[in-house]
């Protein structure tokens, strides 16, 4: 979805998507030491995007994948790789249906989680999979 298109107001879920984008932006700008505000915001973004993806998977699966990936990265920054793993794995599973760039980014996030968990062979295999995905125009 492109922002500020003439039909933004009529697109299904556009206000919800904007709210989720705002939650993600807030979560990504909070410093590590800001407490639970960033993770709370990211968790809310996941919950809201799950609802949208449940109603319209073809339109919102990529958004849910991005929310999961963003939250996994936030957890990694806080040294919580174990908690980040299931989120990164789900992001990859969802991104497989989308393919292309979203899948590559999700795989790289998963590889970073594996590295943080000292699961280096799985990290290398995941990075190799990401490298095999052809670039899109």
Image: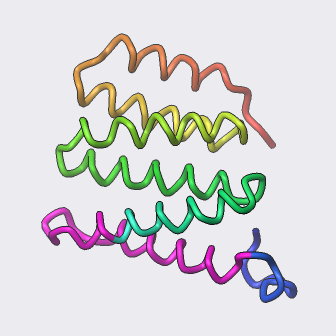
Q: Is residue 40 left or right of residue 132?
A: left
Above-or-below relation of 14 to 120: below
- In which quadrant of the rendered image does the C terminus lie? top right
The percent coordinates of residue 60 (x first, y second) are 68, 59
The percent coordinates of residue 72 (x first, y second) are 36, 47
- For the point 16% across and 72% down, the residue is 34
- For the point 29% across and 17% down, the residue is 119
Q: Which residues are magenta?
A: 13-40
- For the point 57% across and 55% down, the residue is 64
Above-or-below relation of 93 to 118: below
Above-or-below relation of 73 to 45: above
**Nearer to the camera, 28 or 11:** 11
- In which quadrant of the rendered image does the N terminus lie? bottom right
Above-or-below relation of 12 to 136: below
The percent coordinates of residue 120 (x first, y second) are 31, 15
Q: Is residue 55 left or right of residue 51?
A: right
User: Tell me, what colour scheme is on the image?
Assistant: rainbow
- For the point 73% across and 27% down, the residue is 134
**Nearer to the camera, 18 or 51:** 51
Q: Residue furthest right?
A: 6
């Amino acid at each position: 979805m492109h922002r500020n298109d003439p039909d933004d107001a009529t697109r299904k879920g556009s206000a919800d998507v904007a709210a989720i984008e705002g939650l993600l932006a807030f979560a990504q700008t909070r410093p590590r030491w800001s407490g639970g505000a960033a993770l709370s915001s990211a968790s809310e973004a996941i919950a809201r995007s799950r609802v949208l993806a449940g109603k319209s998977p073809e339109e919102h699966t990529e958004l849910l994948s991005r929310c999961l990936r963003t939250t996994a990265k936030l957890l990694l920054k806080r040294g919580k790789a174990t908690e980040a793993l299931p989120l990164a794995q789900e992001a990859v599973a969802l991104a497989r249906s989308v393919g292309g760039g979203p899948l590559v980014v999700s795989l790289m996030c998963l590889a970073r989680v594996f590295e943080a968990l000292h699961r280096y062979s799985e990290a290398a295999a995941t990075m190799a999979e990401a490298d095999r995905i052809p670039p899109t125009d």
